[in-house]
Amino acid sequence: MKFKAKEIADILGGTVDGDPEVTVTAFARIESGKPGAICFFANPKYEHYVYSCKSDIIIVNRTFVPKEAVTATLLRVDDAYAAVASLLDYVTAQKRSYRRYRGLRCRVRLSSKIGSKVYIGDFAYVGKKAEIGGFTKIYEHVYVGDGVKIGSKCIIYPGVRIYPGMVIGDNVIIHANAVIGSDGFGFAPLEDKSWKKIEHTGNVIVEDDVEIGANVCVDKSQMGSTVIRRGTKIDNLCQIAHNVEIGPDTVMASQSGIAGSSKIGSHCIIAGQVGVAGHLTIADDTTLGAQAGVLGNVKESGQVLMGSPAFPLKQYLRCYAAFKKAGK
Amino acid sequence: MKFKAKEIADILGGTVDGDPEVTVTAFARIESGKPGAICFFANPKYEHYVYSCKSDIIIVNRTFVPKEAVTATLLRVDDAYAAVASLLDYVTAQKRSYRRYRGLRCRVRLSSKIGSKVYIGDFAYVGKKAEIGGFTKIYEHVYVGDGVKIGSKCIIYPGVRIYPGMVIGDNVIIHANAVIGSDGFGFAPLEDKSWKKIEHTGNVIVEDDVEIGANVCVDKSQMGSTVIRRGTKIDNLCQIAHNVEIGPDTVMASQSGIAGSSKIGSHCIIAGQVGVAGHLTIADDTTLGAQAGVLGNVKESGQVLMGSPAFPLKQYLRCYAAFKKAGK
Amino acid sequence: MKFKAKEIADILGGTVDGDPEVTVTAFARIESGKPGAICFFANPKYEHYVYSCKSDIIIVNRTFVPKEAVTATLLRVDDAYAAVASLLDYVTAQKRSYRRYRGLRCRVRLSSKIGSKVYIGDFAYVGKKAEIGGFTKIYEHVYVGDGVKIGSKCIIYPGVRIYPGMVIGDNVIIHANAVIGSDGFGFAPLEDKSWKKIEHTGNVIVEDDVEIGANVCVDKSQMGSTVIRRGTKIDNLCQIAHNVEIGPDTVMASQSGIAGSSKIGSHCIIAGQVGVAGHLTIADDTTLGAQAGVLGNVKESGQVLMGSPAFPLKQYLRCYAAFKKAGK
């Protein structure tokens, strides 16, 4: 990136208070600003940094009145916090190019159908009869199995593995080394106490606007589909077992796991390292606190749960206070 | 897949009650049946779906007497539940082909020994003096280090990494992006409070009939071997540290971890997100409940444990009931 | 490896008590010694194994006086435990070769700068303007994005993904399938209850002498850097979120996770399956017990914490004893 203050003001609909020609090439946080960088100031707690900040530009609210001398050029906008998100968007969009590209060393099977302006990196493999929509970017080292369907404007980062027959919607982002479509963990006990594999012939459907983190695993179903519904966001290292349905618009933080056949409603917030047992239904708008373990259905929507087994947060905190007291 | 009702009856030893020529191309669950699909009905709770189901074939127990009109062709067998598992097996086996294949863009070092009818996908790498048994399938992007031995009839999914010198038995399945043979996590504290790496020169032995999930990590030992014993099944995202021994016939659900040098007995059931500390011995037939944390040896076999630190489940549930009561 | 007893004595500064010509080709633990192997005896509890051990060489302390007949050649050193670590080091260093190598099927973009004696394996990809220091080993299937900087004497194992713009120091080891630089998990809620992605334009800095385990994820920051400080060691399957800072010389066991913007001090010891919530500061020399969940700042250094939410270990153990008692 490389922007003059006046260019940024144009992008954000702001005004320049200082040198309109000053140029920045990087973002920085206000507490670690340096020459050539642009910072933003939104949280009043950080005001003292404004006066010592060495960045060349600081984005501030239009209403901000400095109490001391400021060396940086100030860029005044209606909402400094929102303006930064917009600027990050703008910069990212600038970097993204939609052009046809085939790595010298990729392999795309002839019977696959590839949309327009698709990027396929070196060492990527696209299997037979796979379909990839327009403007999608398949990074280096990605494996797209036979018959996989991927929508348009997706970003599939290096080393993602998509087993044969899986279905990915539009505008989906999948981070490096995530695995979509491994076998569900299903075994029947035999008389000699060994385990017989139950074959899984279903698939995984990832709907539009989903984001899946690095090293996430999503297992395919025994029959039917494991479904990640529209707009759901899944953080790194999560486990989504066979036949699970989750979302739409649910978020799930790192290292959480949902066991087989459970249904997680819409707009849920699942914190880190949470576990949900199998064959459960979790109501819409449920919040599960960090490290919660859910062993029963959650029928009433809008609850906040914690503990293992989990129960309502407020009660949990009182219980935990009593627990701590008992050890004094 | 594509089957007529009469063909399925032949495979399963059943009888057709309806149109023997009706053709299906997919499995479906009874609650989401659709034309062209085959369902099964085993759990009496789901009987009402039999009458509304739009699938063309439903597998039912021989003894089933419908209480209402059924539009689907019924396929009667001794045990509908077992029949479906058999049919899933049959379909999966049909899809599996044992033929020699070399991807155009794989690399197999000349000093390796490859058995008959082995599949090696594009971008797979097989190192020097590695040995791969007959009928094994090495998917695209797999890394097989120098001197690795892999048995026959294994399936190694895309992106699996097997460090040099590791040993894999027969009929082993390893899912995508699992790592076999990374260094154990061992460091000695130095006087300046930094850490000195302890080198690991041992290996990992994965015995016959083991299944290892996606993104699992199995570390090699310092000396000697980390051993996954025959028939053990490990779910996605599990951690098996250096010098661990586990199994035979133990199952371990997703996101669980076993710390260094612990021995897990045979026929144990380890639920999700369980942790077992290092240098412990866990008796045969132990069951560890979800999110349990085991900090001591488990000497008596057949116990069910929960909590962190873990203790017997029944007691745990009473304790937890008291804990919840204290917060009311 | 292949060594005579007298050669090992030279390496370790020890003396041979038995046949100086006897040859060994492997390490073994004293309890599972076999012909052709070398063992060590340091822990008095294992003395009975010395007399039954079938290994050809046993390393013992100079002061050891056998109480029974020993068939193995004894190799006497000042400190048997330290000697083994040295010997493991020696053997590992012997195997390591520093020579220029390019896999037949790697792809290295022309604008990258590669130091002397760098190994780049088959199917490895090195992006535009990337820089790799001398003596570094880039294993097969590694992805090094555009503009990445990697120092000298690093080992990057197969399948590691380093997103564009990340910075790796000297003597860094990264195990297979780890991901460095995936997007931070940041989304802003919109009025329709869907989530808008907040773009992350920062990077990850991994300082010198860091080791990162298999399948670890380190997210890049929104702006500025996620930083893994010098000498920090991170075990398999850990999560390091955006804008986290950790170390120097902190160790973090498997399956632990640090949420966004938290700062973990130096010389901390984080056990397995620990979670630290976002925007916290953890003081130097803190020890977090297995499965601890940290929800508040830790201001005083040197504490040992456990529980979820975590508090001091000693108190926790008393509380937990009371908790267990309540269920009797």
Image (tube, coloured by chain):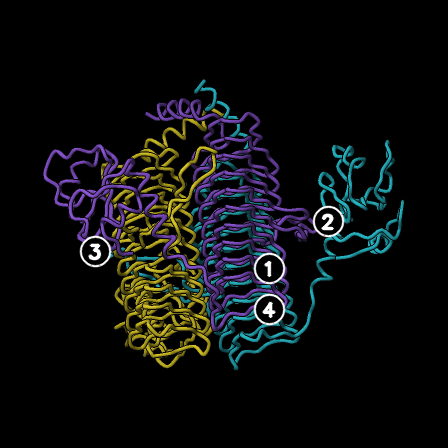
Chain colours: A cyan, B yellow, C purple
Question: Residue at label 3?
Answer: A191
- The residue at the point 28 percent across, 35 percent down is C78
Q: Residue furthest top?
A: A328
Question: Residue at label 2?
Answer: A27
Asked if labels 3 and 4 share a chain, the reply is no
Q: Secondary structure at mark 3?
A: loop
Residue C104, relative to residue A213: is it above or below? below
Q: Residue A173, located in which quarter of the rendered image? A: bottom right
Question: Residue at label 4?
Answer: C109
Q: Secondary structure at mark 2?
A: strand
Q: Position of residue B210 (x, y in %)?
A: 30, 58
Whether the residues at callouts 1 and 4 have beta carbons within 8 Å, the answer is no
| Residues packed near mark 1 inside 10 Å, few (<14), some (14 to 19) or many (20 plus) | many
- The residue at the point 12 percent across, 41 percent down is C70
Question: Residue at label 1?
Answer: C131
Q: Residue B79, located in which quarter of the rendered image? A: bottom left
* Pair 3/2: label in front: 2
Disc 4 to disc 2, how far (Cα)? Answer: 27 Å
* Pair 1/2: label in front: 1
Asked if labels 4 and 2 share a chain, the reply is no
Q: Quadrant of the C terminus of chain C?
A: top left
Q: Which of the two discs, 3 and 2, labels the residue nearer the N terminus? A: 2
Q: Quadrant of the N terminus of chain C?
A: bottom left
Marker disc for residue B160: none
Q: Which of the two discs, 1 and 4, labels the residue nearer the N terminus? A: 4
| Residues packed near mark 2 inside 10 Å, few (<14), some (14 to 19) or many (20 plus) | many
Q: Position of residue A64 (x, y in %)?
A: 85, 38
Whether the residues at callouts 3 and 1 have beta carbons within 8 Å, the answer is no
Q: Residue B279, located in which quarter of the rendered image? A: top left
| Residues packed near mark 4 inside 10 Å, few (<14), some (14 to 19) or many (20 plus) | some
